[in-house]
Amino acid sequence: MKNIIRVYIKSYDFKILIKIINKLKTISFDSKIKFSGPVFLPNKKEIFNILRSPHVNKDSRDQFQISTHKRLMIFFNVNSNFIIILRDSLFYYSLDFNFKFFY
């Protein structure tokens, strides 16, 4: 029976995302667990327009953008020790992760 874990990782900063993925690769190499990925998922862009002056000059605006970067890693034949190591190693600021288990 194969135990499969899908780890979805989201972050605003792609540099932190690259560090986390490299850390996950080294952890899986050390514990001799096969993995697939990272799979690049579509980025989400949020664009905000703000008026510079509230009274006049409607044409004068500032634009701001927030990008959310997403990746997917799939791990095969996982044991319980590896799950605990994964959970403990994914704590960074501005990082969101989600585990999905398949048995």
Image (tube, grey):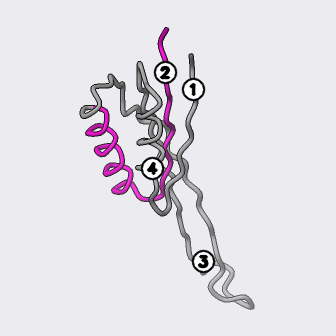
Please check the rendered image and state whether residue 32 is part of the magenta-colored stretch, yes or no: no
* Residue tagged 2: 4
Per the model, the C-alpha gap separating discs 2 and 1 is 6 Å
Question: Which numbered disc, 2 or 1, marks the residue that appears first in the sequence?
Answer: 2
Residue that appears at 50% across and 48% down: 10
Q: Residue furthest front?
A: 81
* Residue tagged 1: 101
The answer to which quarter of the image holds residue 40 is top left
* Residue tagged 4: 88
Q: Of helix, strand and loop, which one carries label 3?
A: strand
Magenta residue span: 1-28
Residue that appears at 42% across and 34% down: 81
Q: Amino acid at mark 3?
A: Arg
Residue that appears at 29% across and 31% down: 31
Is 18 situated above or below 65?
above
Per the model, the C-alpha gap separating discs 4 and 2 is 18 Å
The answer to which quarter of the image holds residue 74 is top left
The quadrant of the picture occupied by the C terminus is top right
In the displayed structure image, the side of residue 100 where residue 89 appears, left or right: left
Question: Which numbered disc, 4 or 1, marks the residue that appears first in the sequence?
Answer: 4
Observer-side mark, 4 or 2, equals 4
In the displayed structure image, the side of residue 47 where residue 16 appears, left or right: left
Question: Which numbered disc, 3 or 1, marks the residue that appears first in the sequence?
Answer: 3
Is 18 situated above or below 4?
below
* Residue tagged 3: 61
Q: Of helix, strand and loop, which one carries label 4?
A: helix
Q: Amino acid at mark 1?
A: Phe
